[in-house]
């Protein structure tokens, strides 16, 4: 019995080889159609996956996408505040990426320019907002452009980063000293940079959190926490739900202009690329089906003979499906490789940045090509129902 199975298997693959080599020209046409379809499919899928990750990265460069605020007032005289320890209760990573978490405390102060060596006022004071910040990678939450930068450091004084509009209001420049006063509390800071944030932050002064806490008289308190959380627009709500359960005393919500904008842009790009992939696969299938129709007409006598000598319909069908799958595999391997390279070139030419090859795209494109090839072999499957007598009488 084992010898019979081995003989049948050997005969099966001999017939498959014969089917593939009987008409090399037509096989080449089918492979070209499948390869071209696989190339375009792989290129578009790679651009789609790369766009998803690249959009997430680019949108994170615009700033925070999640904000944590207090639910109710913790200090009756200063309004709603969070405990500074809340920062430590927020996880450091999500979905394999680092979470940037920055604590903020806002204080309204009177600021005026002073000489670093004298206690005399050099100009009248102006009311501004001082923002104390605490956390690493502040640029991920507060991206800015440097307008002016001090060319020396003052190690014995706190540093201030000033928004461009606040700098114009105070008529201050880098290397100068500001006095910040809030009632009985006074601090001095050294102007290290003047920056353009592109928002309300341009009217504010940024310094270390503990300096703002001393000015406000609220040690170990912060107003809010801004987070830059990695992940897609679909993953962010899940993270927010989890964090809300961990911080019941706070309110966790997304910054919607970022999350919704990212989702809309990606959905449009994804929909366009997915529709194009479907169209390409359908056209590829039609091209292959046209070639398979001619093949089916040529093989009527062969199928009639196989059935006349005892071949089952199942065996005949398996032969044709194996042939189609092998053609799809060959076209998919070659075409997908070319498609990955094509996506890199397209990304660089159209978007100015080469798309990164995504390994998941390669097997997906090959599988899709095999499925299209098998589906396009429908004309060959119709040969299974042919009656040998009709073929030999010339009636089929």
Image (spheres, rainbow, N blue to C red):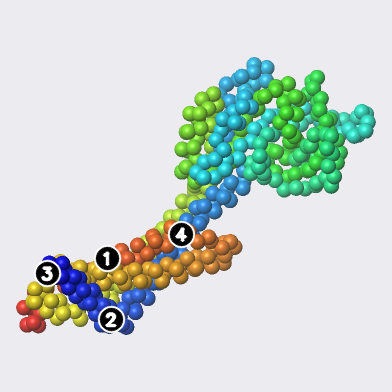
**Residue 375, disc:** 1
Task: Mark 1 and mark 2 in contact? Answer it, CB < 8 Å.
Answer: no
Q: Earlier in the sequence, mark 3 or mark 2?
A: 2
* Secondary structure at numbered mark 1: helix
Mark 1 and mark 4: span between their CA atoms?
25 Å
Apparent side of residue 340 relative to residue 283 in the rendered image (left or right): right
Mark 4 is surrounded, within 10 Å at the Cα level, by few (under 14), some (14 to 19) or many (20 or more) other residues, namely few
Q: Quadrant of the C terminus?
A: bottom left
Tell me the quarter of the picture where residue 139 sits. Answer: top right
Numbered badge on residue 359: 4
> Taking the image as drawn, is residue 149 in sight?
yes
| Residue 355 x, y percent position in the rendering | 53, 61
Give whichever of discs 1 and 2 has the lower sequence position.
2
Locate the N terminus and report the quarter of the image it occupies.
bottom left
Q: Residues within 10 Å of mark 1 (few under 14, many from 20)?
A: some
Q: Tags 1 and 4 in contact by the CB under 8 Å rule?
A: no
Which residue was labeled with disc 2? 21
Give the residue at x 13% y 76%.
306
Q: Is residue 88 left or right of residue 38?
A: right
Marked residue nearer the N-terminal end (4 or 2):
2
Residue farthest along the top direction in this orientation: 76
């Amino acid at each position: 019995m084992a010898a019979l199975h081995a003989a049948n298997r050997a005969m099966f693959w001999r017939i498959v080889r014969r089917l593939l080599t009987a008409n090399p020209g037509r096989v080449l046409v089918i492979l070209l159609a499948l390869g071209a379809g696989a190339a375009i499919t792989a290129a578009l899928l790679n651009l789609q996956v790369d766009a998803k990750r690249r959009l997430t990265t680019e949108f994170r460069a615009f700033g925070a996408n999640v904000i944590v605020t207090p639910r109710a007032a913790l200090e009756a005289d200063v309004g709603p505040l969070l405990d500074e320890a809340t920062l430590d209760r927020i996880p450091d990573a999500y979905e394999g990426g680092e979470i940037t978490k920055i604590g903020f405390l806002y204080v309204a102060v009177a600021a005026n320019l002073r000489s670093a060596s004298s206690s005399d006022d050099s100009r009248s004071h102006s009311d501004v907002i001082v923002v104390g910040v605490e956390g690493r990678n502040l640029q991920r939450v507060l991206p800015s452009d440097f307008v002016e930068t001090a060319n020396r450091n003052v190690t014995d004084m706190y540093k201030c980063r000033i928004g461009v509009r606040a700098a114009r209001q105070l008529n201050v420049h880098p290397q100068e000293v500001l006095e910040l006063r809030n009632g009985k509390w006074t601090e001095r800071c050294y102007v290290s940079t003047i920056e353009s944030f592109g928002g309300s932050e341009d009217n504010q002064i940024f310094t270390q959190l503990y300096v703002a806490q001393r000015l406000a008289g609220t040690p170990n308190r912060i107003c809010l926490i801004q987070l830059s959380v990695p992940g897609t627009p679909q993953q962010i709500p899940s993270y927010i739900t989890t964090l809300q359960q961990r911080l019941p005393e706070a309110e966790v919500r997304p910054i919607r202009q970022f999350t919704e904008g990212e989702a809309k842009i990606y959905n449009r790009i994804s929909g366009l690329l997915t529709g194009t992939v479907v169209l390409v696969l359908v056209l590829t299938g039609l091209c292959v089906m046209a070639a398979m129709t001619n093949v089916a007409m040529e093989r009527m006598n062969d199928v009639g003979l196989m059935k006349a000598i005892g071949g089952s319909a199942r065996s005949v069908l398996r032969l044709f499906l194996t042939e189609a799958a092998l053609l799809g595999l060959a076209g998919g391997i070659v075409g997908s490789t070319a498609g990955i390279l094509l996506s890199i070139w397209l990304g660089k030419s159209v978007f100015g940045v080469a798309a990164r090859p995504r390994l998941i795209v390669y097997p997906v494109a090959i599988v899709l090509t095999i499925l299209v090839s098998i589906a396009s072999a429908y004309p060959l499957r119709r040969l299974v129902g042919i009656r040998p007598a009709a073929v030999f009488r010339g009636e089929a």
